[in-house]
Image: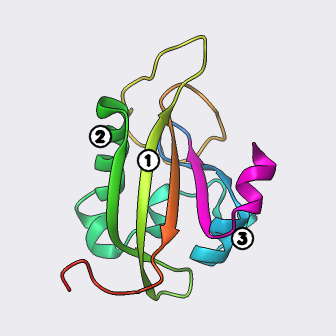
Amino acid sequence: MRLVADSATDYAFITTDPEGCITSWSKGAERIFGYSASEAIGRDGDIIFTPEDRARSAFRLEMDQARTEGRANDDRWHLHADGKQIFCSGIATPRTNSAARTSPRRQPVPACKGSRAAGSCSRMTRRNSWGRSPNC
């Protein structure tokens, strides 16, 4: 599966642990968001969200929606590593393992752990080539 994700460079495949810390970062995520895997893994998944979306906890709300409804779709401005905003479409889905069901989000912890526990999320994002606001 890793080979498929890394060959799809028009798509960013990102996984997080239950606390929202990034556990994997595809080649497409590197190309779209500008962070290398070594820069992104272990950081909070909200690094790709704008300051306004961070202030309203958009990333956490999206993770919660994915866990309760099975997926969360979004079309919004995201943040590139260079600080520029890019418009992307994204889908977040919960990841489960066979031993446990998806758990609700726990409170964020100061140090990120690279676990693949139940309650983790996967996100697939595609940068929209037209680069316009959803309000246009």
Position of residue 56 relative to residue 135, above or below, is above
Q: Give the residue number, with chain letter if any, for mark 1.
A: 92
- Counting every numbered tag in the picture gives 3
Mark 1 is surrounded, within 10 Å at the Cα level, by few (under 14), some (14 to 19) or many (20 or more) other residues, namely many
Disc 3 versus disc 2: nearer the observer: 2
What amino acid type is highlighted by mark number 1? Ala
Residue extending furthest toward the left: 135
**Is label 1 in a helix, a strand or a loop?**
strand
Which colouring convention does the figure follow? Answer: rainbow
Position of residue 126 relative to residue 102, above or below, is below
Magenta span includes 12:
yes
Q: Mark 3 and 2 residues: CB-CB less than 8 Å, in contact?
A: no
> Quick one: label 3 or label 2, which is nearer the N terminus?
3
Q: Residue at x 28, y 83 (%)?
A: 133
**Is label 2 in a helix, a strand or a loop?**
helix
**Is label 3 in a helix, a strand or a loop?**
loop
> Quick one: label 1 or label 3, which is nearer the N terminus?
3
Q: Residue at x 30, y 30 (%)?
A: 68
Position of residue 79 relative to residue 120, above or below, is below
> Quick one: label 1 or label 2, which is nearer the N terminus?
2
Q: Position of residue 60 (x, y in %)?
A: 34, 48
Residue 66 sits in quarter: top left
Q: Position of residue 23 (x, y in %)?
A: 65, 47
Distance between the Cα atoms at labels 1 and 2? 9 Å
Q: Give the residue number, with chain letter if any, for mark 3.
A: 36
Magenta residues (range): 1-16
Q: Give the residue number, with chain letter if any, for mark 2.
A: 65
User: In which quadrant is the C terminus drawn?
Assistant: bottom left
Q: Residue at x 29, y 67 (%)?
A: 53
What amino acid type is highlighted by mark number 3? Ser
Residue extending furthest toward the front: 130
Residue extending furthest toward the top: 99
